[in-house]
Image: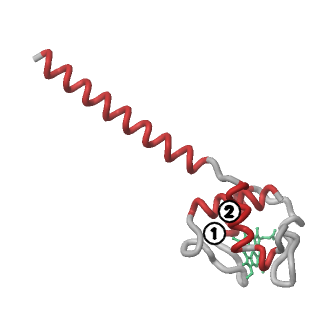
């Protein structure tokens, strides 16, 4: 009786610990958008219209003209006004969208 209670408690604790660590790993990965990772994503997907440093071109406005928040950039990239192409979902992953938004915010 005592043995089976011990076994049960051990299994429950191990399951709890595994569940917690798995959750915190994915949450922290999602919570840290990286401007460093976003830079090459911007070069490949955005610079043709917005310029290599976000200064703008005939195809797209300067991204330095307005100081936008991360959340507002994220919203524009996720749901852009025409003629800006919708690159998510499809071309970019959710993580790449966060990274490129962090990069644009840093410009
Ligand atoms: C084909 C050209 C093109 C590409 C590629 C493109 N954009 Fe745009 N983008 C535009 C145009 C045009 C607008 C202005 C849309 C409008 O009329 O509101 C715009 C608007 C924006 C704005 C809002 C600018 C402001 O402050 O008003 C942001 C932020 C932005 N783009 C970010 C990005 C990012 C990040 C990428 C790459 C993932 C990207 N764009 C790719 C053409 C482009």
Instruction: Report whether 11 appears left or right of 21.
Output: left
Q: How many marks?
A: 2
Colour approach in the figure: secondary structure
Residue 38 to residue 2: above or below: below
Percent of width and height locating residue 15: 31, 35
The residue shown at (86%, 64%) is 66
Image quadrant of residue 102?
A: bottom right
Percent of width and height locating residue 77: 68, 69
The residue shown at (54%, 75%) is 90
The outermost residue toward the top is: 2
Where the C terminus falls, by quadrant?
bottom right
Residue 105 to residue 76: above or below: above
Percent of width and height locating residue 14: 31, 31
Say what secondary structure mark 2 lies in: helix
Q: Ligand 1 lies in which image quarter?
A: bottom right
Badge 2 is on which residue? 74
| Label 2 CA crowd tier, 10 Å (few <14, some 14–19, many 20+) | many
Front residue of 25/1: it is 25
Dot 1 and dot 2 residues touching (CB under 8 Å):
yes
The outermost residue toward the left is: 1
Q: Which mark is residue 4?
A: none
Q: State yes or no: Cβ of the residue under disc 1 lies below 8 Å from any atom of ligand 1.
A: no
The residue shown at (81%, 83%) is 59
Percent of width and height locating residue 43: 74, 70
Residue 86 to residue 16: above or below: below
| Label 1 CA crowd tier, 10 Å (few <14, some 14–19, many 20+) | some
Where the N terminus falls, by quadrant?
top left
Image quadrant of residue 19?
A: top left
The residue shown at (35%, 33%) is 16
- Separation of marks 1 and 2 at Cα, in angstroms: 6 Å
Say what secondary structure mark 1 lies in: helix
Q: Which mark is residue 78?
A: 1
């Amino acid at each position: 009786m005592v043995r089976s209670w011990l076994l049960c408690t051990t299994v429950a604790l191990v399951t709890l610990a595994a569940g917690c660590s798995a959750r915190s790993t994915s949450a922290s990965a999602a919570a840290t958008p990286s401007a460093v990772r976003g830079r090459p994503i911007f070069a490949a997907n955005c610079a043709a219209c917005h310029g290599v440093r976000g200064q703008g071109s005939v195809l797209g406005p300067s991204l330095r003209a307005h100081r936008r928040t991360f959340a507002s950039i994220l919203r524009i990239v996720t749901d852009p006004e025409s003629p800006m192409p919708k690159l998510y979902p499809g071309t970019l992953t959710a993580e790449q969208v966060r990274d490129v938004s962090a990069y644009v915010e840093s410009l």
